[in-house]
Image: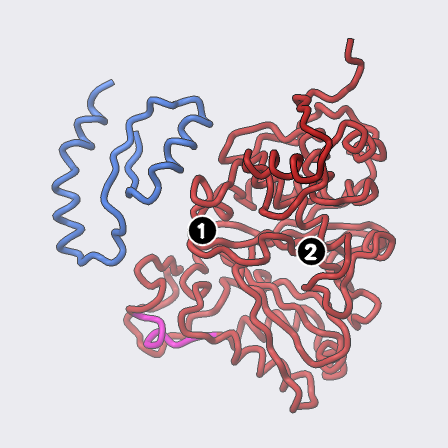
Chain colours: A red, B blue
């Protein structure tokens, strides 16, 4: 009699690296890269720190309409290369994408091809070595790589979003392999995102946003925070940028300010809220530059935007609160803004040691 | 029933099966639609309207 609490089917394959990897690949269970074999021992170890019934379902995930059990999340976390201590972060990320406003089936199935980006706040980032400093969008840190990859594998293997099948992304983005970073709270002059939202500083959170692309903004010339903001705004005003047409469906953007730029904005007396308001007020495109091109055919503008006025200014988001501002990165003068998708909203979820 | 373009055929059948409706009636329009003129889209609409109404009117 099998006394294991795990319900997953047991599969025996030859104990050889190539045979195991071939098996996973042939069944379409990977992101294309080799995975860690999800043995019973490793899955139990992954679940162990969480102390919950593995069959407990966090919810039903679309479009496969499948229950997301802790066991299935743990299997994918093992495959992704997570350590057991990463598991609560992965669980929080899955809980976040299960929120109806994230609309995982929509934003991960559509041709737009957005990646779920995980931003970690709070003490957990430091404890788990989740990089929010130099090169935090890139490779080099197991926690960043494995946590982001685990979420992606859950989306593929549990939600059923397989490219060319229910995932109809035209191009997608490399961020779909893994995209996880921490806010660089140590080098931020502002309150971190989770504190902005009312969480205690001692709490840890994940913020998930569906992002189509990273737009870098190099500003090495000006020396004041307001001038840096001006350059950021000019970068956002891009012809063909879909967000101008998607404000009616709630498209948001995330501004990732590097520590040097953040320090200059702070020195200019700007808070995070001021930065959001400045971008909302200034990152606007005149109607005559938007009309008849790009995503105009499927625009979704609120009534107050006068389409008959060629000089009417269209904001990049429908309100200042639709701009997330975090500080991340290391030395240097490179900030970025992340273009969100429509019909999905940014979600923040507390990371807890148990449910 | 559902109306899709041919690019979404596999996705529609997979989704229907996931929802326990493998036999759902799906009308497949040619893809892509976005690059067609308004007149072409209207012609397609007339071409498929009767089939769609028929499927909506029968159980």
x 37%, y 35%: residue = B12
Quick one: label 2 or label 1, which is nearer the N terminus? 1
Looking at the image, which is closer to me, A322 or A10? A10
Q: Residue at x 84, y 67 (%)?
A: A186
Q: Is residue A278 left or right of residue A109?
A: right
- Label for residue A296? none
In percent of width and height, residue B38 lies at 17, 56
Q: Chain of mark 1?
A: A
The secondary structure type at the circle numbered 1 is: loop
Q: Position of residue A284 (x, y in %)?
A: 46, 74
x then y, percent, for residue B54: 17, 27
* Res. A180 mark: 2
**Given the image, what chain letter belongs to the residue carrying mark 2?**
A
Q: Quadrant of residue A323?
A: bottom right
Which secondary structure lies at badge 2?
strand
Q: Is residue A19 left or right of residue A161?
A: right
Q: Position of residue A118 (x, y in %)?
A: 67, 53
Q: Residue at x 72, y 68 (%)?
A: A135
User: Is residue A296 found inside the magenta-colored segment of the image?
Assistant: no
Q: Residues within 10 Å of mark 1 (few under 14, many from 20)?
A: some
Q: Is residue A95 above or below residue A266?
A: above
Write down the residue under mark 1. Answer: A169
Q: Is residue A290 magenta?
A: yes
Question: Which one is nearer the viewer's eye here, A232 or A133?
Answer: A133
**Real-space CA distance between mark 2 and mark 1, rounded to the nearest whole angstrom:** 20 Å
Q: Quadrant of residue B36?
A: bottom left
Q: Is residue A181 above or below residue A135?
A: above
Residue sticking out furthest to the top: A1
- The stretch of residues the image draws in magenta is A284-291
């Amino acid at each position: 009699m099998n006394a294991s609490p795990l319900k997953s089917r047991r599969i025996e394959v030859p104990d050889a690296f190539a045979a195991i990897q071939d098996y996973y690949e042939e069944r379409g269970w990977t992101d294309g890269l080799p995975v860690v074999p999800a043995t019973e021992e490793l899955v139990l170890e992954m679940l162990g720190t969480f102390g919950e019934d593995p069959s407990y379902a966090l919810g039903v995930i679309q479009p496969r309409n499948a229950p997301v059990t802790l066991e299935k999340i743990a299997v994918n976390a093992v495959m992704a290369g997570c350590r057991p201590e990463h598991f609560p972060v992965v669980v929080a990320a899955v809980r976040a994408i299960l929120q109806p406003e994230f609309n995982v089936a929509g934003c991960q199935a559509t041709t737009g091809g957005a990646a779920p980006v995980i931003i970690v706040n709070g003490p957990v980032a430091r404890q788990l070595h989740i990089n929010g400093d130099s090169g935090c969008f890139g490779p080099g840190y197991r926690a960043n790589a494995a946590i982001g990859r685990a979420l992606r594998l859950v989306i593929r293997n549990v939600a059923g979003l397989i490219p060319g099948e229910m995932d109809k992304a035209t191009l997608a983005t490399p961020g779909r392999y893994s995209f996880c970073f921490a806010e660089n709270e140590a080098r931020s002059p502002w309150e971190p995102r989770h504190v902005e939202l009312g969480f205690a500083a001692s709490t840890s959170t994940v913020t998930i946003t569906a992002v189509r692309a990273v737009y870098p903004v190099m500003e090495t010339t000006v020396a004041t925070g307001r001038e840096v903001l001006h350059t950021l705004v000019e970068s956002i005003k891009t012809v063909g940028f879909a967000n101008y047409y998607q404000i009616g469906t709630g498209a948001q953007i995330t501004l990732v300010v590097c520590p040097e730029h953040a320090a200059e904005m702070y020195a200019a007396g700007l808070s995070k809220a001021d930065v959001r308001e400045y971008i909302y007020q200034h990152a606007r495109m005149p109607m005559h530059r938007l009309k008849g091109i790009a995503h105009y055919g499927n625009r979704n503008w609120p009534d107050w935007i006068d389409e008959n006025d060629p000089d009417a200014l269209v904001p990049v988001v429908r309100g200042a609160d639709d701009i997330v501002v975090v500080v991340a990165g290391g030395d240097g003068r490179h900030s970025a803004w992340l273009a969100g998708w429509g019909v999905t909203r940014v979600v923040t979820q507390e990371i807890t040691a148990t449910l | 029933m559902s109306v899709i373009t041919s690019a979404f055929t596999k996705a529609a059948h997979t989704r229907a099966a996931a929802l326990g409706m493998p036999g759902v009636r799906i009308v497949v329009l040619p893809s892509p639609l976005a690059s067609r003129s308004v007149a072409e889209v209207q012609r397609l609409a007339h071409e498929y309207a009767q089939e769609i109404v028929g499927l909506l009117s029968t159980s």
